[in-house]
Image: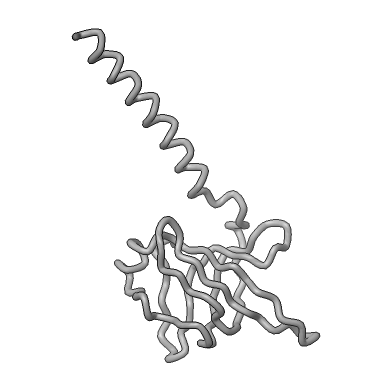
């Protein structure tokens, strides 16, 4: 019985180590340039206040008239709810301005720092 208990503890420790390392990799910021911020303004296509990351898709019109969809990632829904975000904070069709850390490599993506909502309110994330 004592050997089984030790084996169970050892297996649980290994499982926790594997899970924690994969979670750290999943929630990392290595794909974003954390030394810079950029601001975009556009129309919300989609808003998902979900875990593990809240996501916004924003259609931004470029100078040449072409539209580019930006993927704006944020912290978990739980963290955003704590700082004032709600499920209906934004909806498809709203015009918003968002500031965040841009993706490395020029992809149209960013890690959200703050958003200016259609009513002029400014909401930040719990990240900064």
Foreground residue among 51 and 64: 51
Q: Nearer the viewer, residue 61 or 113?
A: 61
- Quadrant location of the N terminus in the rendered image: top left
Residue 21 position (above or below residue 27): above
The residue closer to the viewer here, 98 or 36, is: 98
Q: Reply above or below: 105 against 63.
A: above
- Residue 38, percent across and down? 62, 71
- Across and down, in percent, residue 14 comes to 39, 24
Q: How is the image coloured?
A: one colour
For the C terminus, the image quarter is bottom left
Give the residue at x 65% y 81%. Answer: 60
Q: In the displayed structure, does residue 13 sit left or right of residue 28?
A: left
The count of marks equals 0
Question: Along the horizontal axis of the image, is 69 left or right of 97?
Answer: right
Position in image of residue 126 (x %, y %)? 39, 63
Question: In which image quadrant can residue 90 be found?
Answer: bottom left
**Identity of the residue drawn at 25% across and 8% down:** 3
């Amino acid at each position: 019985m004592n050997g089984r208990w030790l084996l169970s503890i050892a297996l649980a420790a290994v499982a926790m180590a594997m899970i924690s390392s994969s979670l750290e990799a999943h929630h990392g910021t290595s794909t974003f340039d954390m030394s810079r911020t950029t601001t975009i303004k556009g129309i919300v296509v989609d808003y998902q206040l979900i875990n593990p990351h809240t996501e916004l898709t924003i259609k931004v019109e470029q100078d040449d008239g072409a539209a580019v969809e930006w993927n704006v990632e944020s912290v978990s829904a739980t963290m955003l709810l704590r700082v004032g975000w709600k499920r209906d904070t934004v909806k498809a069709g709203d015009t918003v301005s968002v500031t965040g850390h841009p993706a490395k490599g020029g992809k149209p993506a960013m890690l959200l720092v703050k958003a200016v909502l259609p009513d002029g309110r400014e909401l930040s994330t719990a990240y900064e």
